[in-house]
Amino acid sequence: MEFLHTKEISGDRELDITAETCPMTFVRTRLALDRMASGQTLLLRLRGEEPRRNIPRTATEQGHMVIAERETADGTVLLLLRKG
């Protein structure tokens, strides 16, 4: 996993779950991944320690790859996943 500080990151699709709480953070992430083709990337915008900890772990357990993670100045985390 790459931690990016200055480089912009983007995905084939984007999903903002900053207003969601667990377990809806991963429910929405999984639904988005289910609609994508294998190899496509999903850029997530999330907030909070629980989703920051749980989404990468659960996504990896389900066969997806965490490509990059970056925290922005306002505390939002950008997480780039590749569908397995």
Image: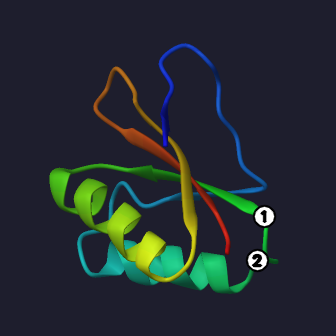
Residue 71 vertical position relative to residue 67 in the rendered view, above or below: above
Q: What label does residue 36 carry, if any?
A: 2
Q: Position of residue 11 (x, y in %)?
A: 72, 49
**Residue at screen point 42% across, 61% down:** 17
| Left or right, residue 62 beside residue 51 | right
Q: Secondary structure at mark 1?
A: loop
| Left or right, residue 66 beside residue 48 | right
Residue 61 vertical position relative to residue 77 in the rendered view, above or below: below
Q: Secondary structure at mark 2?
A: loop
Relative depth, front residue between 38 and 33: 38
| Left or right, residue 49 beside residue 19 | left
Which amino acid type corresponds to the residue marked 2 in the rendered image? Met
**Residue at screen point 24% across, 75% down:** 22
Q: Position of residue 40 (x, y in %)?
A: 78, 64
What's the CA distance linking mark 1 and mark 2?
A: 6 Å
Badge 1: residue crowd in 10 Å (few <14, some 14–19, many ≥20): some
Q: Quadrant of the C terminus?
A: bottom right
Residue 24 vertical position relative to residue 39 in the rendered view, above or below: below
Q: Which residue is mark 1?
A: 40
Q: Position of residue 51 (x, y in %)?
A: 27, 62
Q: Residue furthest top?
A: 6
| Left or right, residue 38 beside residue 76 | right
Which amino acid type corresponds to the residue marked 1 in the rendered image? Gln
Q: Residue furthest left?
A: 49
Badge 2: residue crowd in 10 Å (few <14, some 14–19, many ≥20): some
* Residue 18 sits in quarter: bottom left
Q: Position of residue 23 (x, y in %)?
A: 27, 81
**Residue at screen point 47% across, 18% down:** 5
**Residue at screen point 38% across, 41% down:** 77
Disc 1 and disc 2 in contact, CB within 8 angstroms: yes
